[in-house]
Image: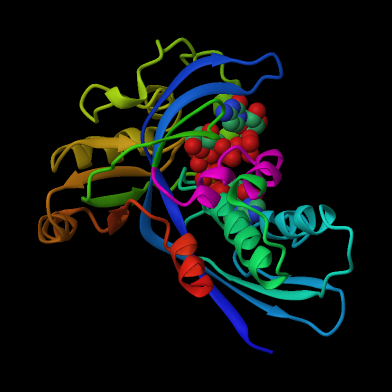
Amino acid sequence: MATLTLPSPAKLNLFLHITGRRADGYHQLQTVFQFIDLCDSLSFRLRDDDQITLSAPGVDVSPEQNLVMQAARALAQTQHQALPGVAIELTKAIPTGGGLGGGSSNAATTLLALNHLWQLQLSSAELQRIALPLGADIPIFVHGEAAFAEGIGERFSATETPATWYILAHPDVHVSTPRLYQHPDLPRQHPPIAATNWQQQTTTNDFEALVCKLYPEVANARATLLEYGPTRLTGSGACLFTQFASKAAAQQALQQLPQSLNAWVVRGLQHSPAAKALSELSE
Ligand SMILES: C[C@@](CO)(OP(=O)(O)O)[C@H](O)COP(=O)(O)OP(=O)(O)OC[C@H]1O[C@@H](n2ccc(N)nc2=O)[C@H](O)[C@@H]1O
Ligand SMILES: Nc1ncnc2c1ncn2[C@@H]1O[C@H](COP(=O)(O)OP(=O)(O)O)[C@@H](O)[C@H]1O
């Protein structure tokens, strides 16, 4: 049986403002999601039985807790018909727990791939509704286009993101998203801005000061990167990105960074390569 292999890209939060907190503890935010060309890879092969299996080397959770498996099961549960089993293989390149949304992206790629392989013909909006209870960051990867996001990160307005290059750096610490969201010192009252009115220079990441205070490794990496260009935290960290006008400029700066800092040159993308690959398949 043929194997479907799809990329599963990382995201950056070009800015992130926390504008409030809901009664259930979830935070209201405003952010711009942009995809980057750092991608995990997922392959899907239909099986002759009804089992869903997952091989995911390097991920620190069991297959059943993996967001890929959770997405596959959540999608199957919406159907009132027997579905063929599927063997899924995940190859990671995106660092986990870095604010790059790797797990969320894997879940979204799984929903898109199985919607195709199981011939369910669910719309993007329906897949996003199935995705949201699994994680606030999953719908954007199903949506597949860079966007200004509100709500808890699931309501999108179209926006053009800069076609630019970054150094992406991963300070050697694991930042816990729930810990950060629960922290008493997290600012939560950023006045909302209009979706049409965001600019990199006039926005910020509301996690950044707190993450730098709690994790000196992030503060040190930020200070180093700021010598090369405008630098910001993505999501709740720990990764930082520094913007460059060209690939050559980013590569030149990368050569000069201390060897001890894990860093890559990546490109900002307006469209998710996963959604793009699938829409090409369906044409
Ligand atoms: C901070 C962001 C920014 O894009 O990304 P990461 O740093 O994780 O990549 C997201 O808001 C993370 O989204 P995600 O990681 O999918 O969150 P979930 O699994 O739904 O929730 C993880 C934890 O964060 C809290 N949470 C999440 C999203 C949100 N808008 N408000 C919250 O308070 C939840 O209460 C939960 O304890
Ligand atoms: N497919 C997956 N890939 C990576 N992490 C996963 C996956 N499924 C579940 N997880 C869990 O989610 C945590 C956060 O992963 P990730 O989505 O990469 O980070 P972040 O939310 O910081 O962007 C991991 O530490 C891991 O325990």
Position of residue 113 measured from the top left corner of the image (x, y, whole percent)? 62, 66
- Closest to the observer, 273 or 101: 273
Magenta span contains residue 132: yes
- Closest to the observer, 219 or 263: 263
User: What colouring method underlies this structural image?
Assistant: rainbow
- When asked about the image quadrant of residue 47, the answer is bottom right
Above-or-below relation of 138 to 53? above
- Closest to the observer, 153 or 215: 153
Magenta span contains residue 218: no
Q: Is residue 252 left or right of residue 171?
A: left
Q: What's the magenta region?
A: 127-146
Position of residue 13 measured from the top left corner of the image (x, y, whole percent)? 39, 38
Position of residue 108 measured from the top left corner of the image (x, y, whole percent)? 59, 55
Majority secondary structure in the magenta region: helix
Residue at image location 62% in from the left, 70% down from the top: 57
- In the rendered image, which quarter contains the N terminus? bottom right
Above-or-below relation of 59 to 98? below
Residue at image location 71% in from the left, 55% down from the top: 71
Q: Quadrant of ligand 1?
A: top right
* Residue 253 visible in the snapshot: yes
